[in-house]
Image (spheres, rainbow, N blue to C red):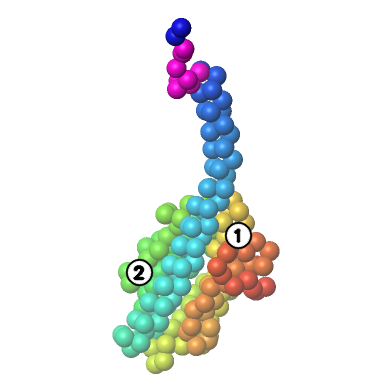
Amino acid sequence: MHRPSQAGLTLIEVLIGLVLLAVLGGLAIPSFGDYLERQRLKMAAEQLAESLNLARAEALAQQQFMYVQLSGQGGERWCYAVSAQAKCDCLTGACLPVQRVDSTALRGIELAGSSRPMFRFNWKNGSATGGNGTASFVGQRTGQRLCVVLSNLGRVRMTTSKTKPVPGYTPDAGCS
């Protein structure tokens, strides 16, 4: 008597396995999209923090005022520029900045707002007296928010909102 091999899978078993994979994949896609947006949100805030630190260092090194000009607040198309010129609109390209960052690589991240359109650094001591403030970025899909805070002393820190916090950042009521 000949017995059939038990190693082969039937068509029904293969179909059941494919259906389970499709269901699990469908559940994972939304959370993966949220993860990608959170990474872009972190990148936007961290790049601004690095640009503010660059402007401070350039002010001290070049012995002149340096500015970080924010353009396109409240929209998906935004940019900012580090420049020695007080009025450097990076959307129009009206100046030659030391550094320019825009939203093209950060799809779905909005420059939600800023307490001022320009941050200024003093060349004497690197302070931001009169040029301090906060800029906030928000993910359009998740609603999570990160804020970049510049103190009068020229120090930069990042916070997140208390309502929809980004893990790894300090929640602050001022970041809303």
Seen from the viewer's position, the closer of residues 13 and 59 is 13
Residue that sits furthest to the bottom in the current view: 124
Q: Residue 38: where, in percent of width, then height?
A: 53, 57
Identity of the residue furthest to the front in this view: 1
Asked if residue 6 is among those painted magenta in the image, a careful observer would answer yes
Q: Which of 168 and 46 is in front in this view?
A: 168
Range of residues picked out in magenta: 3-10
Whether residue 87 is visible to the viewer of this picture, yes or no, is: no
- Residue placed under numbered mark 2 in the picture: 99
Report the amino acid beneath label 2.
Gln
Q: Please state the horizontal and vertical placement of residue 79, each as a whole percent of the image.
A: 45, 62
Query: Which of the 4 quarters of the picture holds residue 110?
Result: bottom right
What predominant SS class does the magenta segment belong to? Answer: loop
Residue in the image at 41% along x and 72% along y? 51
Q: Residue 144 carries which label?
A: 1
Determine the secondary structure under disc 2: strand
Q: Is residue 11 above or below residue 24?
A: above
Which amino acid is tagged 1?
Gln
Q: Distance between the residues labelled 1 and 2?
A: 27 Å
Vertical position of residue 82 compared to residue 39: above or below:
below
Compare residues 124 and 90 and report the one nearer the observer: 124
